[in-house]
Image (spheres, grey):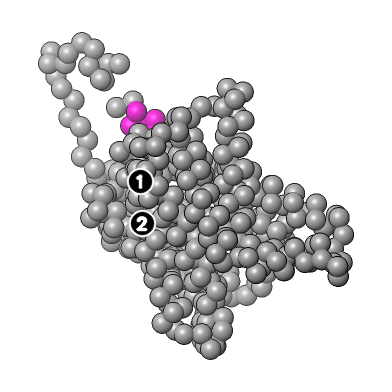
């Protein structure tokens, strides 16, 4: 009972932690990495994973934290989680290659519904109530409204010559791999009893080989172009720009450590569906900041999209509160039937 109470109390803090880490990561990439012509996505992810592992080992060496020692059996069991994570990232990048960002966001939010029903029937999770469906609808509607201009103008594809089947095929694969990653992570956390730093260690360590292989297979031409830009005979890049890029990668890598930890924490104390909802709603502060501090377009569609997403989050919170209130409470045993030293007394 005490463990359950602690978990329920930790959920809001875990969600807040995940939101802050996600926002920090996004803003860092927006303000720093977007200023440089760096397109080696898999290499960047591999560097982030390596930095996460090194940072974890340094903290472990100084006894600031601890994690399980590497075990081959546990690594084999956990590899499917790290593979699903890499596939989610890869299919997402391919979908964005063909689809416009508004359309990608719409289908990404539709994935929340797929996750909710998959968690219900595959992991025996909480039922999907009507109020939850209303909240899902509001969140999806928010992305539709925000991207309505592009949709009505027929700008659903980045390249008009691209195949619609290929574009939406990658989007479908991204929805499937996203749901698979969250379900695999949730089920493995239950079966292995991993703590949060154990998850950070195995997730990042096992992701490195896959990311390195994907980078070698797909990014050699881009790496050659980047090398020529910085070190070629016609290079016009100064040292300050190189150090700025290096610093940006380092800061984003440290931020990814926070993402890894808060993701594990959030998934452990909440549901996969709640995690998906939080992932969709944590873009609201960034959107608002873009309207207030940056040059983001402020019009009826953008403001309405933010408002709908906000109300969708409130409705989902109410749905979860109703579900918790309706859940059957354990019936306490009479005092004379309780054994000394039972779990409730410890």
> Residue placed farthest to the left in the image?
337
The span shown in magenta is 3-8
Density class for disc 2 (Cα within 10 Å; few <14, some 14-19, many ≥20) is many
Sooner in the amino-acid sequence: mark 2 or mark 1 = 2
Residue 115 placement: quadrant: bottom left
Disc 2/disc 1 C-alpha distance (Å): 10 Å
Q: Is residue 279 magenta?
A: no
Is residue 215 left or right of 185 when viewed as pictured? Answer: right
Q: Residue at x 14, y 19 (%)?
A: 334
- State which quarter of the image contains the N terminus: top left
- Residue closest to the eye, 139 or 180: 180
> Circle 1 sits in a helix, a strand or a loop, which is it?
helix
> Circle 2 sits in a helix, a strand or a loop, which is it?
helix
Name the residue carrying label 2: 180
Q: x and y percent of residue 4 in the render?
A: 33, 32
Density class for disc 1 (Cα within 10 Å; few <14, some 14-19, many ≥20) is many
- Residue closest to the eye, 66 or 152: 66
| Magenta span: chief secondary structure | helix
User: Vertically, is 14 above or below 36?
Assistant: above
Residue 341 placement: quadrant: top left
| Marker count (numbered) | 2
Q: Is residue 5 magenta?
A: yes
Name the residue carrying label 1: 186
- Residue closest to the eye, 286 or 33: 33
Q: Residue at x 46, y 40 (%)?
A: 202
Q: Residue at x 57, y 34 (%)?
A: 56
One can see residue 14 in this view: no
Is residue 83 left or right of 239 when viewed as pictured? Answer: left
Q: Residue at x 28, y 43 (%)?
A: 325
């Amino acid at each position: 009972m005490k463990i359950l109470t602690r978990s329920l109390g930790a959920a809001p803090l875990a969600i807040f932690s995940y939101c802050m880490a996600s926002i920090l990561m996004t803003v860092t990439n927006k303000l720093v990495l977007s200023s440089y012509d760096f397109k080696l996505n898999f290499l960047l992810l591999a560097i982030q994973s390596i930095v996460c592992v090194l940072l974890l080992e340094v903290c472990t060496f100084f006894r600031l934290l601890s994690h399980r020692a590497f075990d081959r059996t546990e690594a084999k069991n956990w590899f499917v989680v790290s593979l699903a994570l890499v596939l989610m990232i890869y299919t997402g990048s391919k979908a964005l290659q063909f689809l416009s960002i508004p359309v990608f966001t719409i289908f990404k939010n539709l994935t929340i519904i797929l996750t909710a029903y998959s968690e219900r029937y595959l992991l025996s999770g909480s039922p999907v109530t009507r109020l939850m469906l209303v909240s899902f609808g509001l969140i999806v509607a928010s992305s539709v409204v925000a991207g309505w201009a592009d949709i009505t103008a027929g700008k659903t594809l980045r390249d008009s010559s691209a195949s619609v089947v290929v574009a939406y095929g990658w989007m479908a694969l991204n929805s499937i791999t996203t749901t698979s990653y969250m379900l695999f992570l949730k089920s493995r956390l239950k079966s292995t009893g991993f703590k949060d730093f154990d998850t950070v260690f195995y997730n990042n360590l096992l992701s490195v080989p896959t990311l390195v292989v994907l980078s070698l297979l797909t990014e050699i031409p881009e790496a050659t172009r980047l090398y020529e830009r910085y070190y070629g005979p016609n290079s016009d890049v100064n040292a300050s720009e190189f150090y700025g890029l290096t610093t940006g990668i380092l800061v984003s890598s440290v931020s990814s450590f926070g993402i890894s930890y808060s993701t594990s924490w959030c998934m452990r104390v909440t549901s996969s569906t709640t995690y998906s909802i939080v992932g969709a709603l944590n873009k609201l502060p960034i959107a608002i900041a873009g309207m207030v501090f940056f040059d983001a377009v402020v019009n009826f569609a953008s403001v309405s999209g933010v408002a709908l997403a906000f109300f969708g989050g409130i409705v989902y919170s109410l749905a979860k509160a109703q579900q918790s209130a309706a859940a059957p409470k354990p019936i306490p045993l009479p005092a004379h039937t309780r054994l000394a030293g039972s779990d409730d007394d410890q």
